[in-house]
Amino acid sequence: MASRIYAWLDSRLKLTSLEETLLDEPIPGGASWIYVFGSATLFLFVLQAVTGMFLAVYYAPTPDHAYDSVQYIEQQVSFGWFVRGLHHWGASGMVIAVGLHMLQVFLYGAFKPPREMMWMVGVVLFLLVMAFAFTGYLLPWDQTAYWATQVGINMVGTVPLVGDLLVKVMRGGETLGALTLSRFFAVHVLFLPALIVSGILLHLFILRRVGPAGPWDERKAAAVSERFHPRQVFMDAVVMVCVFLVLAFLATFVPFPLADKANPSDTSFVPIPEWYFLFYYELLKHIHGPLEPLATWVLPAIVIVVMLLWPFLDRQKAVRAPASRPMGMAIGAVFLITVFSLLGISLKNLYGMKRTDPGIAHGQTLFANLGCAGCHRIHGNGGAIGPDLSYVGDARPDREWHIKHFLDPQSVSPGSIMPKFPLTEAELQDLTSYMLSLKRAS
């Protein structure tokens, strides 16, 4: 039955010729696991598109509702937490995959003639992936998203002549607000997908016209030739399944909690960007004053231009072996060592900081917003009507007791004048976490 349907479609759509075009591409040197990164990047983009569409069904791109809509996705929508987790970790996976793909192309000299245009389109696609990451970061509208985006927009303002104009275009006005969120959402879900799909199609078109580069050893490349199907297809499929399983594990067991809702008046908040921007975040710490534009736009512009023009800057046009390109390898090594050193320093500093669990921090905010300090005292601050809660985590270490107490104080403390609070399950857990954190120092 399936063969008859395929034959019927093939007679009208010429599927056999399309299949030959897509699957019969000869690979010089044969199939290899080193070639899987391009397909992995494509798979991750499709995954991001699919999960993003489902998130957009419930997301509301306004400052009044964005944060609550993300919370609703996390807490109320069936498997919403899983879809958001896939989308979050998929962004990191896509940055890693496209980085490894570019590194493989660089090491194998696959940017050399006649593949210069393919490399340049790849660099543009990498920049679009980073733009995806930046524009998507604001959408949850929590403190981290708001202030990290504010820092990024302010950096754009340092570009001479057009900086102020670019800032106004990005913000949609004088301040970061409703128009900013609306524009970032539109760019993230409309403009960038259209650009990246066009770039992917162009990238694949050029690949089909010039063919895969194969190994850098020309004799090995000429000695063996193998079609894309079936071995390379199998390798790509195995990697795609493994990537999905890793992302599913992270989405399930490594949640990505929201910070507090964005508060434009809280200028004391120190944002921490995603890990793939941390090296740049660290660089900015060390360059101040008159030299600040050097870090905010001069160096990034130089790096981007060099990456784009690298096929023309590499003088040894016919040589692809890494050992025969010492200058290019040295420049690449210095760049990678610098990036990963800055990333390592930033991670070390972040992990060395004393941090508050997001649930505890949210519980502390709830404690203040509910007016609990009017009756309860913590370390000398607050009222004295109710019990002192300075060390309640030692006196009452039972989580279930606290939850029952918040739901119905009379059930566990007969005669209590404490009212019932209409809290969600997440708020109950966070407020309880804060209570349990109030302990004597060990």
Image (cartoon, rainbow, N blue to C red):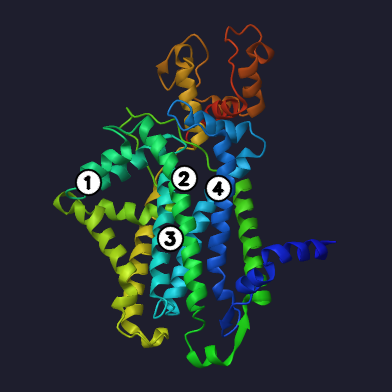
Q: What is the spatial separation of the Cα atoms under label 3 and label 1, in whole angstroms? A: 24 Å
Q: What is the spatial separation of the Cα atoms under label 3 and label 4, in whole angstroms? A: 19 Å
Mark sitting earlier along the chain (2/1): 1
Q: Residue under label 2, please give it.
A: 190
Q: As rendered, which of 114 and 188 lies closer to the eye?
A: 114
Q: Nearer the viewer, mark 2 or mark 4?
A: 2
Q: Residue at x 62, y 38 (%)?
A: 80
Image height of 263 relative to 237, above or below: above
Q: Residue at x 57, y 10 (%)?
A: 418
Judge the density around disc 2: few (<14), some (14-19), many (≥20) Cα neighbours within 10 Å.
few
CB within 8 Å, label 2 to label 4: no
Mark sitting earlier along the chain (3/2): 3
Q: Is residue 351 visible?
A: no
Mark sitting earlier along the chain (3/1): 3
Q: Nearer the viewer, mark 3 or mark 2?
A: 2
Q: Nearer the viewer, mark 4 or mark 1?
A: 1
- Helix, strand or loop at mark 4: helix
Q: Quadrant of the N terminus?
A: bottom right
Q: Residue under label 1, please give it.
A: 163
- Helix, strand or loop at mark 1: helix
| Amino acid type, label 3 | Leu
Q: What is the spatial separation of the Cα atoms under label 2 and label 1, in whole angstroms? A: 24 Å
Q: Residue under label 3, please give it.
A: 125
Image height of 321 relative to 35, above or below: below
Q: Residue under label 4, please give it.
A: 87
| Amino acid type, label 2 | Leu
Q: Residue at x 59, y 20 (%)?
A: 423
